[in-house]
Image (cartoon, rainbow, N blue to C red):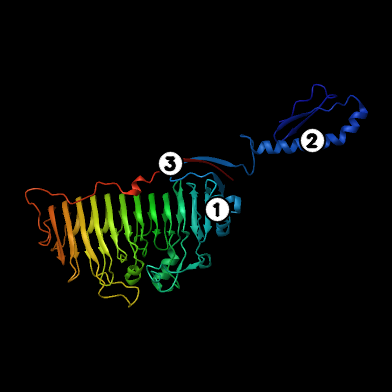
Amino acid sequence: MSCPQASNPDKSIVMRGPGGCFRLLISLRNGRIGQALSAVARKVICIILLVGIIISLNTNGVESRKARNSDWFEYSAISCRAHSASLEEFGGVGDGTTSNTKAFKAAIDHLSRFQSEGGSQLFVPPGKWLTGSFNLTSHFTLFLHKDAVLLASQDEKEWPVIEPLPSYGRGRDTEGGRYSSLIFGTNLTDVVITGDNGTIDGQGEPWWRKFRAGELKYTRPYLIEIMHSQNIQISNLTLINSPSWNVHPVYSSSVIVQGITILAPVTSPNTDGINPDSCTNTRIEDCYIVSGDDCVAVKSGWDQYGIAYGMPTKQLIIRRLTCISPFSAVIALGSEMSGGIQDVRAEDITAIDSESGVRIKTAVGRGGFVKDIYVRRMTMKTMKWAFWITGSYGSHPDNNYDPHALPEIQNINYRDMVAENVTMAARLEGIAGDPFTGICISNVTIELTNKPKKLQWNCTDITGISSGVTPKPCELLPDHEPAQTTECNFPDNRLPVENMGVQMCSYKANYL
């Protein structure tokens, strides 16, 4: 498109720049003045053209090779932030092959300066962002766009080796240390890891292969691990193919895990979904998990190391969970439970094609306790066992455990459940000389598969009661009141984590 000619060429010059047509008001009536101003005019023209370019890059409808996109996000979080930045501003490249470990570290280091000034947020734009392990900071939000994928590096050099957890005494896979998690943090306050359902891909297959072949030097990394921290939110993300556990809050309090989708091949080793470990006041809700191991595994340390550390997991809520785990449990308590597990409340759980619905795992040498466990409104479809409690899960960190350290299993309550296509109703096995007590099962209907086990209830070294349960439980769980159903306990008081409020935050993201 050409510019219109000036109506009086002796009065002005009309030119076209990237931002449109510009009229340069320079009088040419006097020849000497025109000559004197010619150099100045050229400078002014350059300035005008430069301004035109800037305007054009920020004007809708004007073409640009590097036009910026904008998205407006609203999301719920425990805290909103006053400062924000994009990973691209720190040299991030979302091509799936360039390492962004240094970019993440630089961005978070810069944003950590705003901890006392309203906090900060790092935005991860659309793209595939290859990265090794990086650490978070306090008063901080990591936000993933819906089309953003964090790709975990398969280069072991991108994974720092850190000390084993003190309550475990060694790595879970091997003796010695462990690789730091992809997203890691310790001694933090007020941290949010969230997004518009962005993806974190652990690319775990090489790690699984090395684990099976016994080739690992250190314990495999997790996707997200937060240690010694408080006020943590992990929400609205998809996690796939973790090298090992997916989400591991440990030695922490006031933790919310919400709206997470976790996917791994059901044959992948130890790809637990969410593992609260020696944590107080944790809420896990509205999650969908397909796993090669337990969907939720509640832990608190391993044998003598967990006993010495002495930090239980307590005041835990699990609700509105859907899980598929053909070779493990939907909810597991243990087996590392030597610091104790107390006051766990699970409700509105759907289990599909899983080995067991609720499983308590412990052993001689564990010590500790599992008590005050409450589960209700659970639906199970295609299960090996509906209930499983075992006192002979004998994996130990070393041979220095105390054989006289016996676990205490007490006050276990299951109620209001239905199950179909189940091979065996229950396998409940305590420890000789250390019976598991206070087991209560009420209002439970279990429909069996076409080829069920002949023995439906295998019970040893336990005591408790039942009420309104089909098929009829073992003699060690006598019907409390045959004429009517008596409900097992489920607390009606609120735990502090239920009062942990969220607010609506907004963020305008600009990216290339």
Spot the residue most to the bottom: 399
Regarding residue 246, the answer to whether it shows in the image is: no
Q: Which residue is pictured at 35% across the width and 70% down the height?
A: 305
Q: Contact, CB < 8 Å: mark 2 with mark 1?
A: no
Which circle marks residue 311 in the picture? none
Q: Quadrant of the N terminus?
A: top right
Question: In the image, 94: left or right of 22?
Answer: left
Q: Which residue is pictured at 32% across the width and 73% down the height?
A: 396
Camera-nearest label, 2 or 1: 1
Spot the residue most to the right: 32
The one of 306 and 333 positioned closer to us in this rendering = 306
Which residue was labeled with disc 2? Answer: 45
Question: In the image, 281: left or right of 64?
Answer: left
Regarding residue 133, the answer to whether it shows in the image is: yes
318 w.r.t. 227: above or below? above
Residue type at tag 3:
Gln
Secondary structure under tag 3 reads strand
Q: Where is residue 221 in the image (x, y as percent from the top left)?
A: 44, 64
Camera-nearest label, 2 or 3: 3
Q: Earlier in the sequence, mark 1 or mark 3?
A: 1
438 w.r.t. 21: above or below? below
Q: Contact, CB < 8 Å: mark 1 with mark 3?
A: no
Measured in 3D between alpha carbons, the distance from the residue under mark 1 to the one under mark 3, in whole angstroms, is: 22 Å
Which residue was labeled with disc 1? Answer: 112
Secondary structure under tag 2 reads helix
Q: Position of residue 136 (x, y in %)?
A: 50, 56
Residue type at tag 2:
Ile
Which residue was labeled with disc 3? Answer: 503
Q: Earlier in the sequence, mark 2 or mark 1?
A: 2
Secondary structure under tag 1 reads helix
Q: Which residue is pictured at 46% across the width and 54% down the height?
A: 200
